[in-house]
Image (cartoon, grey):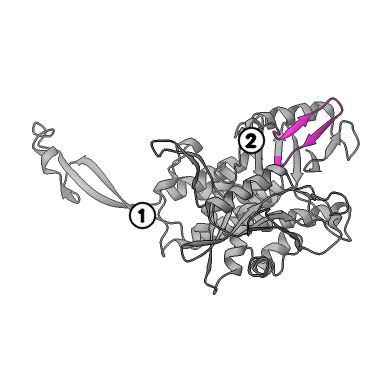
Amino acid sequence: MIRRTVLEWSSIKYGPAPDEIPAEVADRIAAVASASPLARRGKAGVLEHGRKALRARGVVGVVAAGGCALEILPKIDTPGEEGREAIGTVRRRLVHMLAVALDLKIEAGQVTALHWQEETLLEILIRLFTTKLIDSIRQGMPRRYLQHQDDLPVLRGRLDAKRQFTTLAAAPSLVACRYDELTADITLNQIMKAAVLRLSRIARTSDNLTRLRELSFAYADISDLPVSALRWDDVVLDRTNSRWRELLNLARLLLGDRFQTTSSGGADGFSLLFEMNVLFEEYVARMLKRGLVGTELRVVSQGGRLYCLQTEDQHGLFQTRPDILIKRGNGVIQVIDTKWKRIASLLDDPKQGVSQGDIYQMMAYGELYQSDALMLLYPHNARLGADEGLLAAHRITGISKRLSIATIDIAMLSGCAQRLAALVLQ
């Protein structure tokens, strides 16, 4: 199994060396990546298939094909660390972001057991999923009463009088019955089985394969449905099965229903990919909600949905969806737009690498949502030469609104919610 790791927006050359990728392997990886829906979104795609190297874009995750796997990790600074140690730390930060976005609880023991430096992101996620699933099954597989209709020789449950005296009028030996039966063959378990079968085809480490074989045996009596046929909306989570919420979120991720995750699911290739812009936005929004608990402020993610223009017949055009709205009551007191981009220091560029289009967008948000406080929030990086937080605060020409440029250090796991809240409250 050939495994290679590259950072987003970085290249890996073709060749036989450990830090290179064989050209024929690169061709297979690029073919799988090009089949991802993310490759057809905009101009960036997933990978740039050059003559001398593969170059990663703004998408992270794992692309696997024919006995080889390319792991794409985000650019997150790890001061004082290099090589495998730094890569392990980046994986840990990325899994932390996914855990926050998916409402996953990763206990200290689980974190210690994860092989951050040896295993790829995909194997780490499979380890988390299979470990949690085995623990939950040992506490009991969820079951529900489902209604059945059947023609039986004796009455079971209730008589279906209409069918009995019409369809079965000429068959007096049969009784039209309606009854409830307790079964484990329900949508939630069908989703778990689909995830187990999918992961059994792509897992590579012996520990993961052992757990997946154990799980395949446990789900032997559950219907085997293709991913496209799974009825996600039929899943009912209540106090009796609430412990399955995390597993359902992980299954959504691994089966391709969260953060534009994609998977071909066939023998020729597999991709598990995330748009960092989307993940960073979700991470910040959830952390802000935690940080503002107990205040009078609330966080609305992807809300608003006001239109920039109206036709003569009052039909809206160009709907807006700000990343984050900070509200007090019904009023918007701040609009935050998150950008997964490494901006430069003030000495390098007076505009700090901020896009002019982003500024225009924020000005439009300020007018539409009647907010005097606007913020562009970026991940912090060492090139800025300063601590995270507020980098600049500008007054918008001719009006009282102010636009702030700020960063948050993703590498600092502790106190992130409080640090984000402090940015909003200052």
Q: Secondary structure at mark 2?
A: helix
Q: Quadrant of the N terminus?
A: top right
* Quarter location, residue 236: bottom left
First to last magenta residue range:
44-62
Work out whether residue 333 or residue 94 is closer to the camera in this orientation and state it.
Answer: 333
- Mark 2 highlights which residue? 38
- What's the amino acid at mark 1? Arg
Whole-angstrom CA distance, mark 1 to mark 2, is 37 Å
Q: Few, some or many C-alpha atoms within 10 Å of disc 1 (few <14, some 14-19, many ≥20)? A: some
- Horizontal and vertical percent for residue 253? 58, 47
Which residue is most to the bottom?
Answer: 294
At 81% across and 42% down in the image, what residue appears?
A: 6
- Horizontal and vertical percent for residue 90? 77, 54
Q: Quadrant of the C terminus?
A: bottom right
Residue 137: in sight, yes or no? Answer: no
Membership of 60 in magenta stretch:
yes
| Residue 341 vertical position relative to residue 419 in the rendered view, above or below | above
Work out whether residue 261 or residue 241 is closer to the camera in this orientation and state it.
Answer: 261
- Mark 1 highlights which residue? 144
Membership of 143 in magenta stretch:
no
* Quarter location, residue 419: bottom right
Work out whether residue 57 or residue 140 is closer to the camera in this orientation and state it.
Answer: 57
Q: What label sits on residue 216 in the rendered view?
A: none
